[in-house]
Amino acid sequence: MTPLEFDANHLWHPYTNVAKPGPMHLITEAEGVWLTRDDGTRMIDAMSSWWCTIHGHRNSVITEAVKQQIDQMPHVMFGGLTHNPAIELGKKMIDLLPDGLDRIFYCDSGSVSVEVAMKMAVQYQIAQGHTGKVEFATISGGYHGDTWKAMSVCDPVNGMHGLFRGALSIQHFLPRPHVRLNDEWPQDSQVNGLAALEQLLAEKGDQIAALILEPIVQGAGGMYFYHPAWLKGAKALCEAHNVLLIFDEIATGFGRTGSLFAMDLAEVTPDIVCLGKALTGGHISFAATVTSKAVAHGIGESEAGVFMHGPTYMANPLACAAGIASLSLLEDGQWQGRVAQIQTQMQTELEPARGLPGVADVRVLGAIGVIEMHDWVDPSVAHQLAPETGVWLRPFARNIYCMPPFVISPDELSRVTSAMVSLAGLRS
């Protein structure tokens, strides 16, 4: 049995029917923006391996940091113990984050970070005597992960977890902010969409612990970009009703939108932020949930007296070492120029797709490029074409999109945009 035959018969891949697994590529090496298959052909990883390898694969600074750490201390429990990698990473994160976000809870993955944030919000509200505030509000079109509570705030109709809606907690879904990123912002709340949140909090605010959403960019829910002013209005309404504001920056954090965090575009600081993916440059799974002193100390006033969560691999030293190295690579600010160049080039090179008959929209923000189609795009078509085009794309729903590593060259990026436009042409 060949390796691919074993894989097809025994290994379960994400969002895959194991009876019909579809085309699969056996990758033997990854370096920079390139993935190498077992037959020697290479493909540009235009997805940054699900949006995390911002510095490219096998970055020498990150890999060397992990190698040194594994020789010293691969893992130690974080209960009652601490270590320098966790402390140094924490210092770097606080330096990068807006003022006030300075209490860090390390966790395993982005989805777990969302679970932690939701638990924080509920435990905080109960500790403050708001025992009825145990529900959540969010906006339609969102995606926050595949774990149980996180699924409850993913879009219940068009999202990936719609079939579970009868088993999940009932949450409060608002219309997706309809004023787009580059549109003029109307002040009238009936026009800009904030009236729906205002009404919900007026009627149900005593039941809602927090509003959770992806700031500016909805990722797996549709690669949708909305106006940052909506977040300013939402922050004011949440404060008026003692509702915490949670930003899920797992996909947008660490430069993806052209700003270090999407919340910087809105000039809004949430009560809790979820971080992951690019935190370690995509070299090892890791995440963090960061909150304010007020929320953290408020949780300490609860009946339990402590926050009731503690992952086994919390603050894993290998992951912390990777995180320190990844954030160090961002400190010189060169990523800003690279992301700006990526944005400009994609705006130019994806624009021709707008004229194709099957295309609904073309949009770019930072190092995110999207061709939205009128109809669903079969990802297997892109998978089969990848060895020929030399570009690895994984479309979903109606979107052909890319989130390339920041280190991609102009020529390599042109190959990516060409592959995207060609794929859109096949679907037209």
Image: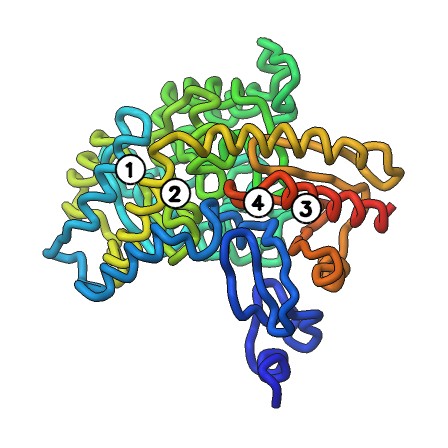
Foreground pick, 212 / 172: 212
Mark 1 residue element: helix
Foreground pick, 29 / 374: 29
Q: Is residue 297 left or right of residue 205?
A: left
Foreground pick, 393 / 130: 393
The nearer-to-camera label among 2 and 1 is: 1
- Farthest residue in the left direction? 80
The nearer-to-camera label among 2 and 3 is: 3
**Residue drawn at point x = 23 percent, y = 57 percent:** 317
Mark 3 residue element: helix
Q: Toward which corner of the image does residue 15 lie, by quadrant? A: bottom right
Q: Is residue 171 left or right of residue 272?
A: right
**Residue type of the residue flagged with mark 4:** Pro
Q: Is residue 119 above or below residue 125?
A: below
Q: Is residue 125 visible?
A: no
Q: How many marks?
A: 4
Q: Is residue 388 visible?
A: yes
Residue carrying label 2: 275
Of pointers 2 and 1, the one earlier in the residue sequence: 1
Foreground pick, 374 / 203: 374
Q: Gap between marks 3 and 4, in whole Å?
A: 9 Å
Residue carrying label 1: 93
Using the image, tell me which numbered label, if any, was put on residue 404: 4
Residue carrying label 3: 416
Mark 4 residue element: loop
Q: Gap between marks 1 and 4, in whole Å?
A: 23 Å
Q: Quadrant of the N terminus?
A: bottom right
Q: Is residue 248 left or right of residue 300?
A: right
Asked if marks 1 and 4 touch (Cβ < 8 Å), the reply is no
Of pointers 4 and 2, the one earlier in the residue sequence: 2
Asked if marks 2 and 3 touch (Cβ < 8 Å), the reply is no
**Residue type of the residue flagged with mark 2:** Leu
